[in-house]
Every structure is written in structure tokens, then in C-alpha cells.
Image (cartoon, grey):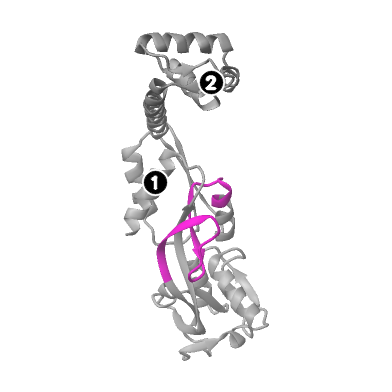
Amino acid sequence: MELRQLEYFVAVAEERNFTRAAQRIHVAQPAVSAQIARLEREVGQRLLDRSRRETRLTAAGEAMLPHARAALSAVAHARLAIDELAQLVRGTVTLGTVTSHNLDIPALLADFHRAHPAVEITLSTDTSAALIDDVQSGVLDAAIVSVGPHEVPLGLAVEVVTDEAIDAAVCLDDPWAGRTSIGVAQLVERRLIALPMGAGIRAQLERACAAAGLTPHVAFEANTPVALAELAARGLGVAIVPRSVSRTHPGLAPIAIKPELRGRLVFAWRSSGPMSPAARVLVEMARRLLR
């Protein structure tokens, strides 16, 4: 009994016609008839009733059909498993990240590389908006991005890396250094130091200002919260940074923004659609690391 005989038998059973079955599996109709005749001789029973205009299963054919389908399905799954193993041996993974985060990317990639040394890994950096677009479009397999509170980008699944308040921060001799909180209306009166457009924290600032009918004056931009903090510590303006930065830098006076702004860093990947076996393994490793 050969797999092609089972494949031809299932095709005829489903199409109820030898000619349509042959067209479906791209084989000449006489070849289909010959192989099914051989199959019937091997099992010792007629499997198809050819006496009518529409080919139908005999009782033996009805009994045979689910087993034939199961055999073909098992072979397909075996091939898929082998293909996936091959991709884990020699596949590729593309990962993106914002420039500042708390996930130990070197440890994650080192663990992955030890388990799958032949998989090529590409790591790139960009703004959160660009990275989210790239994950959604399939350019990247996954990325660490900044999003708003409770925000999950369309078509993506996320695992939280950090979730914290966003502060204003000034140098120690700034007139605002003694304040404990500040409103958005007061922030727009000062020169601000912020991440570039497209960054998650910048988006939260812009959104809060727009809701109040205001426009922030961003005088300086830098690519990392630490760089923003250094500029503010030198008296160049008011930095908009995560609380973990504002309250640990020795040269800054942190000021809570009211109403509170919050930012989340998340590890994001596509929630549906194709993903390579290597990418699936990396995503699961990252999720375990975060948990």
C-alpha cells in the first residue's frame, strides 16, 4: 500500500469523480484509476462504486476513508516537524528594540545561541512607532517597544517589560527644583528635553498636551532617557523621562506630572499569522525571562 494510492483514493472519494480528482492532484486520470485498482486488489475489496454517474464509496470504502485521511495527515505532520527542525538548525530571527530598556537582551540572545547556534540573529534599534510597524508587517519577528497604559498595538501580543510613571526632571538649582508635582499647562511654558517623535514616552507627552489644547516646546531631543537626564542636569531644560531615571540620577530633581502619565515597555510579537519556528522559540524564551 503506497501513500499515493491513499492520496488518489481520498481525492476520488471527496470529488466523487475520477476526472475531477485527477485534475485536483495534477495526475492523468488513467493513472488515478490504475492506482486505485491496485489498492483495491491489495485490500481485497471494492472501495468505489463506479456503476453510477457519480462515483460513490462502497461500505469497504467508507470504512477505509478515515484511516486513509489519518495516514496522510500523519505524514504531513511528520514532514512539517522535519521542516521546523531544519529551520531551527538553519533559520533566521529578526529582533528590534528601543535604545533603553530593562530586558537583558545579551543574556536572552546568548541562551538562544547556545541552544540553536546556526540560527542567524539580526538585532536593530529604532523608535517604538517604526518598530511596531515592522512587527505588524512581518519585517521583524518581535521587538521591545514603548506603548501607553493598557495599549496593545493592533495584531500584536505583548509581555510587559516595565510599567512606570513618567516624570519631569530639572537640575538641582532650577526654580522648579523644590516642586513635587507639575501640570501639563506649566510644562509647555518651559523648554523641554524629550525623546524623538515616534518614541512611546514622547507620544504620551504629545497626547496629554493635545488633550489640553496645548503644544509642547521641545528644545532638545536625545535617543535615550539617560541622555535626556544628562542634558537636564546641565540646566538645558526640563527632561521628560521614566521615573526610574528621574529618581536615580544624582544631578536631577524629579517632579511628578499631574495627571499622571505612564509608559510601558513591552516585548511584542504578531498574535496571528506565520512565524518561523526559530522566532517562536525566541519569543517563548523572552516570555519566560520576563516572567
Q: Residues within 10 Å of mark 1 (few under 14, many from 20)?
A: many
Q: Residues within 10 Å of mark 2 (few under 14, many from 20)?
A: some
Please name whichever residue, 221 or 112, is drawn nearer the observer in this view of the structure: 112
Q: Tell me which numbered mark, 2 or 1, is placed earlier along the sequence.
A: 2
Quarter placement of the N terminus? top left
Q: Is residue 182 above or below residue 236?
A: below
For numbered disc 1, what is the local secondary structure? helix
Q: Is residue 277 left or right of residue 30?
A: left
Residue 86 in the magenta stretch? The answer is: no
- Quarter of the image for residue 248 reads bottom left
For numbered disc 2, what is the local secondary structure? loop
Question: Which disc, if any, is residue 282?
Answer: 1
Please name whichever residue, 64 or 272, is drawn nearer the observer in this view of the structure: 64
Identify residue type, mark 2: Thr
**Numbered range of the magenta stretch:** 135-163
Question: CA separation, marks 2 and 1?
Answer: 50 Å
- Quarter of the image for residue 290 reads bottom left
Q: Is residue 35 left or right of residue 109?
A: right
Please name whichever residue, 161 or 48, is drawn nearer the observer in this view of the structure: 48
Q: Is residue 186 above or below residue 86?
A: below
Q: Name the residue at the front extreme.
A: 51
Disc 2: which residue: 55
Quarter placement of the C terminus? bottom left
Identify residue type, mark 1: Leu
